[in-house]
């Protein structure tokens, strides 16, 4: 079911400062910046590798305010690893299969993620404390 | 410098229970189990994908006791994401380059990791709260 580690999501207080750090330290480059009002974040995707069905990225997340999921995470835990996302080829099929095992879905249906992807989150309490995301990359151009 | 997301490290209280969960929920299979006395953990690697220079895995970590790094992590934060590891082709060169930027190295020299790899950790306080590991996979058999 899982094709790749699509990304690790990292919560930070200052997106631009952290982008500059990752570029200077690890040589990774930004391939996308987005503001996601629905999720209350500014985010950037830094490319690590290409893989089956899509790439692997470091996703840096800065909250749009304190009363957002990432804002509350920062207040509680400070900066650091926020979630992990796995690539799948068929996100609706994967959600049905995983939901069928009893894991609660935070998103019953996929919604829009970075770079045209479809994403859905699983309940961290049902995945051993790990906020887990599924990602189906958009079809590649022919 | 970074070739792939080598693995996400996940701290858990019961390795065998969590392996069974990941197998049943995500269809991933165990490719390695090890006891690492030096790090105070029992660990399992579950295969997600193949990539440049090595694979991508979910690493499940159960502490050998409460007075170990992962044991203290569990007491402080509970089960969940513990670290992220990136694959590199030349770990000594990568450590020299990263150390040269001012990031403190928890391991000045590589040590033995899972499945014959060479690994080293960077100080999380210098990487935005993220415990970050570098992994050089062993040479593949000819």
Image (tube, coloured by chain):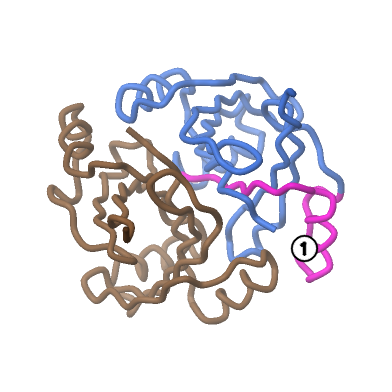
Chain colours: A brown, B blue
Q: Identify the residue at image location x=13%, y=50%.
A: A109
Determine if the magenta segment contains residue B107: yes
Q: Which residue is nearer to you in this view: B132 or A57?
A: A57
Q: In the image, which residues are magenta? A: B81-108
Residue shown at the point (28%, 55%) measured from the top left: A139
Mark 1 nearby-residue class (10 Å; few <14, some 14–19, many ≥20): some
Q: Residue at x 55, y 75 (%)?
A: A19
**Residue pushed farthest front?**
A142
Instruction: Name the quadrant of the C terminus of chain A.
Output: bottom left
**What quarter of the picture does the N terminus of chain A occupy?**
top left
Where in the figure is residue B92, as x and y percent of width and height? 84, 50
On screen, residue B116 above or below A107: above
* Closer-to-camera residue (A70/A96): A96
The mark total stands at: 1
Which is more toward the observer, A127 or A135?
A135
> Residue A40 is drawn in which quadrant?
bottom left
Question: What subunit carries mark 1?
Answer: B
Check disc 1 and report its element: helix, strand or loop: helix
The picture places residue B94, in percent across and down from the top left corner, at 78, 56
Magenta stretch: includes residue A19: no
The picture places residue A3, in percent across and down from the top left corner, at 39, 39
Residue, x 33% and y 57% (percent of image)?
A: A140
Give percent across and percent down for residue B97: 81, 63
In the image, residue A138 sits, relative to residue A44, either above or below, namely above
| Residue that label 1 marks | B98
């Amino acid at each position: 079911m899982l094709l790749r580690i699509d990304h690790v999501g990292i919560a930070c207080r200052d997106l631009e400062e952290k982008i500059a750090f990752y570029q200077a330290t690890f040589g990774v480059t930004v391939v996308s910046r987005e503001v996601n009002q629905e999720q209350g974040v500014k985010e950037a995707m830094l490319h690590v590798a290409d893989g089956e069905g899509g790439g692997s990225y470091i996703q840096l997340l800065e909250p749009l305010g304190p009363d957002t999921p990432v804002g509350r995470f920062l207040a509680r835990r400070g900066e650091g690893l926020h979630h992990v996302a796995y690539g799948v080829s068929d996100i609706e099929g994967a959600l049905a299969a995983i939901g069928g095992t009893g894991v609660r879905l935070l998103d019953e249906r996929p919604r829009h993620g970075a770079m045209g992807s479809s994403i859905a989150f699983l309940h961290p309490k049902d995945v051993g404390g790990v906020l887990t995301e599924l990602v189906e990359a958009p079809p590649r151009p022919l």
